[in-house]
């Protein structure tokens, strides 16, 4: 119906270029013009649909239209009271008269009361004995016809006088109504086909794009709301940990080189060249280029010597040194490779090198011993980094081949293990971990070494959170540090505290393509 009506409007416009009064339209399926308000409401629906496609324009006009009251409706349907009285009676001479009591039964009290007098007045019925009979065989029920006309057209051709009379009789009331004039719109066409919203390959190949009608862009539309950016939980935790280091007076190390040589990742740290961590199964090696440039000659010599033959109070590993192994390029397996670079740089003055960078960016003025700078050029430092490392791990719910390490390094004269323990207690306390325990462990580059355990109240058990130790003289002395300089460090993963913090038990819901974007957007800020 809706389609047919729209089509009618378009066809009428096509023929006459204007519809002066929509009350003149004959809605498909109806016989009479659409003069009633109900019909105009149906037409308005069709007009709005065509207007939204800019196929037409319309103007609305207000009228007071006449509508039937419920009584008026009934008369339009069943006839006037007087006609119903007349119809209930036998024609004079053709049957026995109907008395008043019988009439009430036949047509109802109300109709009998009102209709009887009027029928009399009109000469339709008469008395016979104590009853009533029809005087004429046919009547014209003008009231019914008038109401039918008003009901379908909202007005009457006899004019206002008759309408006023019907209103007085409470058969008709006035209601505000609308009608419309319609003209062609900018996209006028007689086709009601839905306008295209997309230009498709099919339309281009078939050529139908030339004749299609297109939906206009709606620049007023609000569009789908865009979300603001959201920090990944790892970045939030990273920031928190970063702040803890900064408030403890640490400086951030540059850690941008993911690719390191075996020399910096292992040799400089006194990791034996045969150590299993260096195996292909544990470390990603580069195939092109395969090898690094030659490390600085003197330092390289000291490192290779301490490995092969010992020195600085050590007997070394006493295994043949492989230059090839040392220059192999790899993806760093720990950020301690970056720490090694920084420590080597920190010891430059101790090696008697002229240092350009006097800014002291990475060194710390407040030494434990109070000595800021001695003749040997050493300056204490507190350094940290939080960055990515790579390990050839079998991936499972808690392991990926790449993750982030948090690492702190402190260099000063005469540091003891107690200093390291104290530092870590403060550090983990700031992260909200109050109960920490340390367990002796082994690292090739630290002695002593300790694993760090934290009590996890939700899991109700101790979980390993990190690794730590005092760097060995075999590592520090070849760099050029004076003998009384101690360096300690600790490292932990960024993922573990993040997973604990956000209650995530599968790392794939934290990192990678399966991460639900809502979990990122909804992740609360961390507050250790
Ligand atoms: N590099 C160690 C690791 O990967 C962490 C560590 C850093 C240990 C510094 C001791 C000193 O677990």
Image (spheres, rainbow, N blue to C red):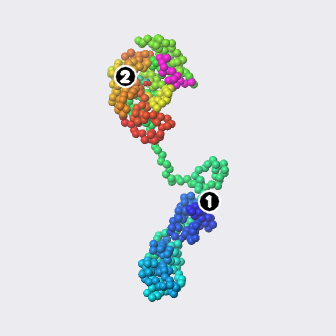
Residue carrying label 2: 439
Please state the horizontal and vertical placement of residue 330, each as a whole percent of the image.
52, 24
Q: Main secondary structure of the magenta part?
A: loop
Asked whether 40 or 458 is in front, the reply is 458
Residue 89 circle label: none
Residue carrying label 1: 191
- Work out which residue is located at the far front of the displayed protein and give it: 96
Q: Could you tell me how far apart the alpha carbons at marks 2 and 1 are, in whole angstroms?
A: 83 Å
- Work out which residue is located at the far right of the displayed protein and give it: 206
Asked whether 496 or 418 is in front, the reply is 496
From the viewer's perspective, is the residue at label 2 or at label 1 nearer? 2
Please state the horizontal and vertical placement of residue 127, each as a whole percent of the image.
46, 87
Label 2, secondary structure: give it: strand
Please state the horizontal and vertical placement of residue 462, each as a whole percent of the image.
36, 28
Question: Which residue shows up at 45% across the image and 85% down it?
Answer: 131
Q: Quadrant of the C terminus?
A: top left
Is residue 140 found inside the magenta-colored segment of the image? no
- Please report the bounds of the magenta region as a residue range: 272-287
Looking at the rendering, which quadrant does residue 423 occupy? top left
Looking at the rendering, which quadrant does residue 429 occupy? top left
Q: Residues within 10 Å of mark 2 (few under 14, many from 20)?
A: few
């Amino acid at each position: 119906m809706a389609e047919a009506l729209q089509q009618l409007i378009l066809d009428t416009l096509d023929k006459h270029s204007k519809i002066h009064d929509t009350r003149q339209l004959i809605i498909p399926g109806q016989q009479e013009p659409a003069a009633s308000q109900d019909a105009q409401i149906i037409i308005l629906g069709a007009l709005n649909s065509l207007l939204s496609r800019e196929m037409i324009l319309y103007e609305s006009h207000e009228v007071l239209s006449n509508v039937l009251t419920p009584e008026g409706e009934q008369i339009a349907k069943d006839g006037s009271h007087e006609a119903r009285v007349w119809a209930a009676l036998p024609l004079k001479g053709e049957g026995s008269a109907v008395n008043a009591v019988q009439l009430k039964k036949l047509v109802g009290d109300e109709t009998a009361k009102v209709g009887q007098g009027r029928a009399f007045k009109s000469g339709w019925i008469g008395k016979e004995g104590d009853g009533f009979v029809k005087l004429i065989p046919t009547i014209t029920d003008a009231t019914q016809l008038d109401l039918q006309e008003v009901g379908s057209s909202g007005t009457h051709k006899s004019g206002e006088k008759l309408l006023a009379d019907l209103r007085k009789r409470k058969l008709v009331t006035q209601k505000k109504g609308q009608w419309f004039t319609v003209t062609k719109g900018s996209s006028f066409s007689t086709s009601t086909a839905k306008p295209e919203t997309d230009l498709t390959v099919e339309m281009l190949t078939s050529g139908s794009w030339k004749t299609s009608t297109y939906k206009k862009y709606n620049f007023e539309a609000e569009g789908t709301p865009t979300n603001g950016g959201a920090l990944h939980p790892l970045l939030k935790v990273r920031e928190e940990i970063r702040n803890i280091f900064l408030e403890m007076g640490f400086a951030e190390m540059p850690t941008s080189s993911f690719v390191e040589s075996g020399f910096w990742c292992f040799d400089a740290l006194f990791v034996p060249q045969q150590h299993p961590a260096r195996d292909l199964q544990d470390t990603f090696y580069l195939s092109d280029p395969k090898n690094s440039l030659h490390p600085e000659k003197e330092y390289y010599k000291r490192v290779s010597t301490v490995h092969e033959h010992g020195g600085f109070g050590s007997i070394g590993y006493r295994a043949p040194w492989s230059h090839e192994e040392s220059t192999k390029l790899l993806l760093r397996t720990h950020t301690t490779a970056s720490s090694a670079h920084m420590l080597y740089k920190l010891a430059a003055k101790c090696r008697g090198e002229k240092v350009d960078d006097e800014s002291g960016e990475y060194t710390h003025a407040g030494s434990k011993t109070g000595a800021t700078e001695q003749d040997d050029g050493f300056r204490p430092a507190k350094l940290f980094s939080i960055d990515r490392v790579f390990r050839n791990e079998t991936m499972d719910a808690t392991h990926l081949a790449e993750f982030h390490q948090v690492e702190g390094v402190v260099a000063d004269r005469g540091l003891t293990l107690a200093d390291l323990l104290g530092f870590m207690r403060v550090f983990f306390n700031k992260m909200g971990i109050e109960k920490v325990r340390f367990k002796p462990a082994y690292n090739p580059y630290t002695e002593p070494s300790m694993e760090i355990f934290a009590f996890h109240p939700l899991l109700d058990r101790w979980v390993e959170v990190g690794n730590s130790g005092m760097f060995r003289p075999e590592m520090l002395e070849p760099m050029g540090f004076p003998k009384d300089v101690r360096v300690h460090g600790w490292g932990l993963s960024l993922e573990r505290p993040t997973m604990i913090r956000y209650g995530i038990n599968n790392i794939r819901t934290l990192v990678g393509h399966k991460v639900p974007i809502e979990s990122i957007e909804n992740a609360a800020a961390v507050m250790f």
